Amino acid sequence: MSFWGGLLIGLAALVVICLIGIFLYFKLKIKLGVVNSIIGVWLVLRDVPSFFKKNDAWINPDLKLEHWPLIKDGMHNSNSFLTYWKGEFWLAHASSPFHFASPDCKIVVWHSKDAKKWERSLELQVPEEDIRDPKFAVIHGKLFLYVLKSVDFNPEPYGTAYVVTEDGKNWSELKELTKNEGWLFWNPRTFDGKKWYVPAYWFLHGKSILLETTDGVDFNYVSTIHNGKYRQQNDRNDETDFSFYSDGTMICTQRLEYSENMRGDERACTNITMAKPPYTEWMEIGKDYTTRLDGPALFTHHDLVFAVGRYYPQVTRREHIGSALTTKRTSIFLVTEKGLIRLSDFPSSGDTSYGGVVMKDGFAYCTYYTSDIDKDWSWLFGMTQPSHIMMVKVPLKALEKVADEKYTEYEENDLFKLKST
């Protein structure tokens, strides 16, 4: 290569570094030095092939699912949740400039009679703080909305707060659950309509507990679901969800990260536990390496427990579960005592998952968020781009049939990836 050719390449690289630095400063408010800008260049260049790659999400045709966008407004919409109350679907999601924590982030609440035409009910924002991971609970006729608050750029929430409404129009002021300081709530549920249970994970990770309430405000400790902290070790137990069987037994999943390595961690997995009433003792079923269920939404139909959550389709020797450098999917799984069974992907790519599910009139209505489904970007790139709230509608009969067939296939061919603990 000639001197002038090398000089031109060097100048071009310098321009790219400057442009990335400017982009990160003005969009993400990050001040980078030369070294970090060079790393940024490498990350962008390694993602270039994904700009041209066709999305190859596996949509199981036997599920006969329908899908359509709900929110597609140029914002980074994420962390969706769905419930049904007073004859309408209620949707909550985060709206932000990007995936990372931002004081510009807000929670938006919508309602709809048909899950297609939506009317805004609430915008919730905390001055100088980030807000995310909304979860609804209908308790004694009132609609509660629980949210997580964060201040770190890398979104690590520190506590749970809530608002409540009796009519969907007039909402209370945001209040922190100071009695449960440091515990991050996931999805409250009830088995008998008298007592509600919520799994919560510790803000420093590594531990999850079960809390109970009768009024949606005063939550009391029931038991420890999982403790992954031992001496200097921490499996980084994160988002935790559960669902009931017909006899009241809970089956619960925990997101185990083990580390924050950009390439993921070979130990990352989904931990599965179970408990019978009164839920004071939990049995460790094992660790499942099918995926790490990020943003899980569990639900039960005819004593089959399903989970909508994140799937990592590009695990290699270098890129492990949790890698930010590969694409992701929102998928639906069967959750069993023998492990997870992937039933299908939903149309998704890049930064995706965090769903909510309503079962109504023979269908499962599932919301989630995703980057552009016509692309196949990495998770990291998707974090900086607009993302959409999507709806998938799945016939429950088809879902049950696929689950039964897949379970038989997994048993006959020993395909489960669960390791007992």
Image: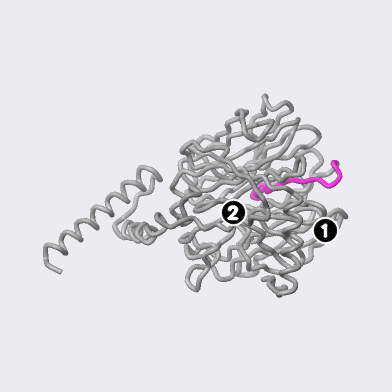
Magenta run includes residue 190: yes
Q: Percent from the top left, x then y, of residue 102?
A: 48, 42
Q: Main secondary structure of the magenta part?
A: loop
Name which residue type carries label 2.
Thr
Q: Percent from the top left, x then y, of residue 158?
A: 59, 48
Residue 148 visible in this rendered orientation of the protein: no
Magenta run includes residue 129: no
Question: What residue sits right under mark 1 in the picture?
Answer: 280
Judging depth in this view, the residue of 67 and 388 nearest the camera is 67
Q: Which residues are magenta?
A: 181-193
Name which residue type carries label 1.
Thr
Separation of marks 1 and 2 at Cα, in angstroms: 32 Å
Disc 1 vs disc 2: which is toward the camera?
Answer: 2
Q: Which quadrant, please, contains the N terminus?
A: bottom left
Q: Which residue: 35% across, 46% down?
A: 25
Question: What residue sits right under mark 2 in the picture?
Answer: 330
